[in-house]
Image (cartoon, coloured by chain):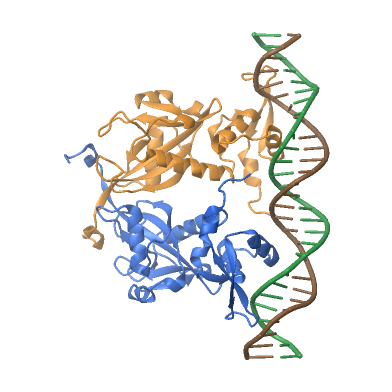
Chain colours: A blue, B orange, C green, D brown
DNA sequence: TCAAAAGTGTTAAGTTTACACCCATGA
DNA sequence: TCATGGGTGTAAACTTAACACTTTTGA
């Protein structure tokens, strides 16, 4: 390709940063890393990575998520581009933030340790590098909106879960208490949340029915309203 | 600054593309440009511009909007980053899309002409360059969501407007008919949509009351629910 | 036997929808 | 005088919110 019209314009480092959400013990959590290089090595940050020369930015996000968790083909949603001139004190870097919802039990804990990454509760985040706090806030806001329209929360749960777990998940994401009876009434109407005949005995003496998300049933739903 | 750790990573051209929405004669419109340079000169496209070396990306969006419309300090919302490897046939360019809502009457028509830019109806868009169609779809989706939560539509109208205009605007954005009486009932409850004592005689013989959006009253609203 | 979590219905209030006719005016 | 767009109310259906007690069982 001949030197193009474009070449008179500057170029920039472009990175992705991943907000990886998990859910454990009734708490919404984010996977944070002790930054492994200078500048500001050792500070709490999101896992990030530079976009490669011939790589789609969405792929860069998947690759970065995979490096830290071992997970493949996880749904990631773009939060947006962060491009203030001085956002990164190392050099100018334009960064695209993405968030992912993962089942903590499926994350490779060895990879986490190798990368000095730890699950931190959303309600008590440490001070974070650069604009990473804003990125997390942006991601949470998107997640709240999404969960009001689509059943995305199930990615944060194991395949079988109790209604109490599900309710705690919604409470953690939305940041507010929900009435137990009203919550269960709403769930009971949804054809894609199925009761199994299995019982969870870990969290109560009585035991709680385990449910499963049936995505086939979900996709059969009409996507318009009468 | 010494050559940093970052410098081993590639750099990219980064651009912004602006989806500029307007509203005229009951139609939602976008300002499109005949592309003024190669490759693919002359094709319909969004107005774009490269980010400058020491410029925030949000500023690049404002600057690009201003070049084409003469408008300053318009609220712009980021749609997202578009970064597929081959999205631009000229060279690799990562582009951040932004949308703006403007009052067509306030746009500098001379600047439009100088830049070969024209208002096109959203319902009959021509074929567009690269991924610009996706950008517009993303912007429309964001706009629909926003308008369900905040009174953003007023930026598309002149300072004084009739209820019929307002209703047509909502119908154009949402893509569906709204019942006139129900619409007016909802509007009549809102303290920040004020009836003036002026009458518009342009669109009907009888004349229609002109209303105004009072943003002071809007900002007095509590931002939580009881 | 008792502490801890699971499970279960009803009613009132509020919101949304559907629907049709008269009004004022300029051409 | 009539064609055009402006303006108005009510009832039924549906949705949401508030609320408290009984069940099961392991320690």
Q: Position of residue B139 (x, y in %)?
A: 46, 42
Q: Taking B23 as reference, is A226 left or right? A: right
Q: Taking B111 as reference, is A138 left or right? A: right
Q: Which residue does the image show at 44% across and 61% down from the upper left?
A: A100
Q: Quadrant of the N terminus of chain A?
A: top left
Q: Taking A21 as reference, is A161 left or right? A: right
Q: Which residue does the image show at 44% across and 46% down from the upper left?
A: B78
Q: Position of residue B2 (x, y in %)?
A: 21, 60
Residue A151 seen in this snapshot: no
Q: Nearer the viewer, residue A158 or A68?
A: A158
Q: Nearer the viewer, residue A63 or A130?
A: A63
Q: Tell me which corner region of the image, top left, top right, bottom left or bottom right, holds residue A145.
A: bottom right
Q: Tell me which corner region of the image, top left, top right, bottom left or bottom right, holds residue B62.
A: top left
Spot the residue most to the left: A2
Q: Quadrant of the C terminus of chain A?
A: top right
Q: Tell me which corner region of the image, top left, top right, bottom left or bottom right, holds residue D11.
A: top right
Residue B10 seen in this snapshot: yes
Q: Relative to B69, is A205 above or below?
A: below
Q: Position of residue B67 (x, y in %)?
A: 37, 32
């Amino acid at each position: 390709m001949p030197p193009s019209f474009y070449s008179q314009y500057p170029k920039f480092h472009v990175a992705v940063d991943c907000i990886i959400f998990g859910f454990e013990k009734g708490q919404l959590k984010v996977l944070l890393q002790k930054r492994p290089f200078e500048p500001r090595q050792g500070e709490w940050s999101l896992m990030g990575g530079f976009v490669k020369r011939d790589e789609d930015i969405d792929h860069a996000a998947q690759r970065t998520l995979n490096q830290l968790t071992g997970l493949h083909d996880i749904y990631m949603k773009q939060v947006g581009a962060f491009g203030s001139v001085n956002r990164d004190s190392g050099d100018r870097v334009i960064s695209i933030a993405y968030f992912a919802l993962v089942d903590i039990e499926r994350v490779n804990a060895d990879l986490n340790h190798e990368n000095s990454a730890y699950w931190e509760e959303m309600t008590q985040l440490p001070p974070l590098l650069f604009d990473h706090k804003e990125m997390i806030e942006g991601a949470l806001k998107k997640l709240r909106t999404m969960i009001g329209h689509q059943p995305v929360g199930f990615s944060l749960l194991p395949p079988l879960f109790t209604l109490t777990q599900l309710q705690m998940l919604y409470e953690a994401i939305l940041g507010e208490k929900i009435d137990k009876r009203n919550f269960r009434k709403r769930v009971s109407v949804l054809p894609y949340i199925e009761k199994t005949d299995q019982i969870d005995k870990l969290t109560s003496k009585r035991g709680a029915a385990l449910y499963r998300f049936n995505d086939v049933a979900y996709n059969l739903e009409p996507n318009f309203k009468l």
